[in-house]
Amino acid sequence: MLVIDGQQGEGGGQILRSSLALSMVTGTPFRIENIRAGRRKPGLMRQHLTAVRAAKKICDAYVIGDEIRSTELTFRPGTVKAGEYHFSIGTAGSTTLVLQAVLPALILANGKSTVTIEGGTHNPFAPPFDFLQKTFIPLLNRMGPTVEMTLDRHGFFPAGGGSFRVEIVPAEKLTGFDLMNRGNIVRKQATAIVANLPIDIAKRELEVIQKKLSFSTDCICYKQINDTPGPGNIVTIEIESESLCEVFTGFGEIGRAAEAVANRAIQMCQRYLKYGAPVGEYLADQILLPLAIAGRSQFHATFMSQHTQTHIDLVQKFLDCRISVDDRQRDGVTITIL
């Protein structure tokens, strides 16, 4: 049985989620210790527990330690089963992070699947729904499966109450690819959404984006929604090139000015555009696992975080692959999977 130290590297929940995903794909049992030891509240929180139980249900796994605040977990996977699944976090915990744990196995399952997850769809410190739908999923589909995501209801922190559905047509195997060049920018779009808040907040955010990124009026839009359990605000900036679409976000918080929310997304966008690499920092971390499952692949990223290095170390424990990082270039890093 593979033993994983949950406090290695950045010591967060991704070590657990990726271990679950890789265990289901490879059939490798594991025990993880010191779960989320690097966090202020260590151990399993609600969204992590939901991910564990979702994985358990999908592959009929034998599990020890699946309880709140548990710092150790044993997971022995069974056979992955395609089907219709519904998971509810019960809090504003991130639905997209739960999906991370189960999607790799289902895109290689023996039939079509539908997954519905309820909770937070737009959370700080987690990839929002828009990033998965417009950036991650299109790249995943290049590898062979057909995955479609539909947002049923926004769910903002701290109220949650959001929901999305994922339709999955699996592939027999995943095919890797090279993603080294961005190409020309073909589309730009900025969107500001407010839920149960004044629309003026969204307008102020877009004014900042127009000024600092020189977006024309036809490249911006705002939306006001009132069907969420609580208030919320998100700004997204989409940069679509010939090779992919990157999405950068800023989240509204109590006490944070609209201009500051917009500036958060603007700064990430400007950092991305400064480099010629097609893959942004957060996408590099997300796309690594499926590409490693696929096999020979290579991509050029703007930056490699400690989060990604931790991910590389973990992936190589489960998979028979070698991952190298070339950080000698001025315009980013090249990650090669062999």
Image (cartoon, helix red, strand yellow):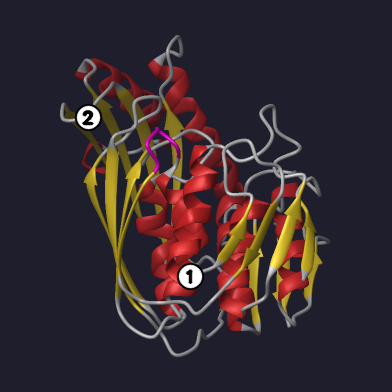
Magenta span covers which residues? 89-93
Q: Residues within 10 Å of mark 2 (few under 14, many from 20)?
A: some
Give residue 21's quadrant in the image. bottom right
Type of secondary structure dominating the magenta stretch: loop
Relative to residue 227, is residue 334 drawn left or right? right
Residue 312 lies in magenta, yes or no?
no
Q: Camera-side residue: 92 or 181?
A: 92
Locate residue 133, reporting x and y percent: 35, 57
Residue 286 % position (x, y)? 56, 59
307 relative position to 250: left or right: right
Instruction: Using residue 82 as the reference point, say whether residue 80 is left or right of it.
Output: right
Taking the spot 73% from the left edge, 60% from the top edge, the residue there is: 31
Q: Residue at x 47, y 34 (%)?
A: 265
Image: 111 above or below 19: below
Q: Tell me which amino acid carries mark 2.
A: Thr
The residue closer to the viewer here, 236 or 272, is 236
Circle 1: element type: loop
Residue 276 visible, this orientation: no
The image quadrant where one finds the N terminus is bottom right
Vertical comparison of 161 with 288: above or below: above
Is residue 229 rendered to the left or right of residue 283? left
Name the residue carrying label 2: 228
The residue tagged 1 is: 60
User: Which residue shows up at 44% across the image and 57% down it?
Assistant: 99
- Identify the element where label 2 is drawn: loop
Mark 2–mark 1 distance (CA, rounded to whole Å): 34 Å
In the rendered image, residue 190, in percent from the top left (x then y), is placed at 33, 40
Q: Position of residue 57 (x, y in %)?
A: 44, 64
Count of numbered marks: 2
